Image (cartoon, rainbow, N blue to C red):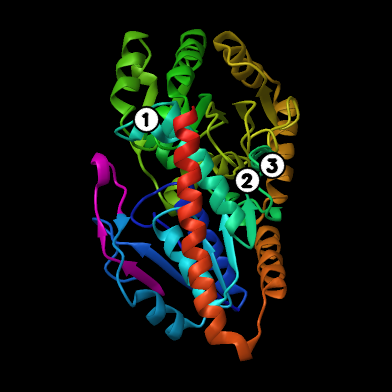
Amino acid sequence: MNILMMTNTYAPIVGGLEKSIQIFTESLRKHGHKVLVVAPEFEGMPEKENKVVRVPAVKDVAHTSFSINLPIPGLASKTIEAFQPDVIHTHHPFFVGDMALRMAGQYNIPLVFTYHTNFEDYTHMLPLDNDGTKQFLIQLSAGFANMADRVIVPSESIRRVLKRRDVKTTTHVVPTGVDVESFGQGSGVSLRKKLGIAHKAFVVGHLGRLSDEKNLDFLMEPLCLFLQKKRKAHVLVIGKGPAEEEMKRYFKRGGVNERVHFPGVLRDQDLIDAYHAMDIFAFASKSETQGMVVTEAMASGLPVVALDAPGVREVVKDKVNGRLLKKENVLAFTDAMEWCCDKEEASFDKLVAAANKTAKDFSIEKCTTKALRVYKQAIHSAHDDKDQKTWDEWVGRIQTEWGLLKNLGQAIQSSIKS
């Protein structure tokens, strides 16, 4: 099968969405399928990439790492003719997503759309952050989903969200898979030694982009309180972002900064070893569609303490493989971390075993099989009348352009009403 992956964000950006595309691409290729990735150009992108087409783009939009692709005449036809995709899989509902929809409509190729992101949770990154902008993004994403042949969501929670938003397209739950075997093989000894963390010290870990949408304003409080109560404990924060300096100032005011460590962004085996330097994983984000770091943590043998939220509640089972807290309460979150820390060794080992067992349900092999099933269903249901090919291409092009305009108009109308 020839699969055309299309995305607005890709290497060198490090995030859950980009990691998801890379994981699925590698796994699909291992299964014998051909995958071509189409993405915009970015500052610092790799010089040599395997089967990646870079689209010229405006870089660093609105002082972010985001790029907006430029419409290049003929690029779509050249890509289609050279690669001959059986299915197009887009990971965004705009910019490159529009290009994907046009390709699919013009060439009668089934389009699969993965709803990775609740974009309304990220309007703080935009010049205009208000309810109208949020409603615009909600309507734009839902409308795009209704123009796709199949929709993939990473969790059942998000499927319910799209249903409430009147998405009618057949929707499949396909989480991003985790390489369970690789994440199970790590050692945190060297990182602990480098950071001055004692071998027997209890370490609470966190990983992700350090920014507002991860609910770090809340998470800092229970982490600080936990360290104040547990004088030999440490906190390990993996990642970078605009909230890092404020986090450091907060922990310094709390008198615990010497036991909070920020080694930055880690990749590959260094990342796996960082997970293994932790004892539990703390996660307070409510903006995730899956929370892939939660499954990575469990694959590394870490019980997870998290807030009940979409994409997280499907993974964390309270007092089974961690703690799942229904309400955003500082004392309750602190108590949950203490509950894990104070466990006797045998009881704690049961949490670890349960976390490992949960991770196996999210293995890359199982998730790739599910994704392939979605592709095959999309291809099977697509119309393929070769005698009408030229006519279908023109009709498809007209229908696509009308659909894009209609969706944009409805999104604008919705934002005005709000």
Location of the N terminus by quadrant is bottom right
Please report the residue visible at 58 percent of the width from the left and 58 percent of the height from the top: 147
Residue 164 on the magenta segment: no
Q: Indicate which disc residue 350 carries.
A: none
* Amino acid on which disc 1 is placed: His
Magenta stretch in the rendered image:
51-67
Residue 368 lies, in percent from the top left, at 65, 63
Residue 63 on the magenta segment: yes
Q: CA distance from mark 3 to mark 2?
A: 31 Å
Indicate the secondary structure of the residue bearing disc 3.
helix
Q: Nearer the viewer, residue 191 or 328?
A: 328
Tell me: residue 327, above or below residue 158: above
**Residue mark closest to the camera, 3 vs 1:** 3
Mark 1 closeness class: few <14, some 14–19, many ≥20 residues within 10 Å: few
Indicate the secondary structure of the residue bearing disc 2.
helix
The residue pinned by badge 1 equals 124
Q: CA distance from mark 3 to mark 1?
A: 26 Å
Left or right, residue 135 beside residue 50: right
* Amino acid on which disc 2 is placed: Ala
The residue pinned by badge 2 equals 299
Residue 334 lies, in percent from the top left, at 57, 14
Q: Indicate which disc residue 163 carries.
A: 3
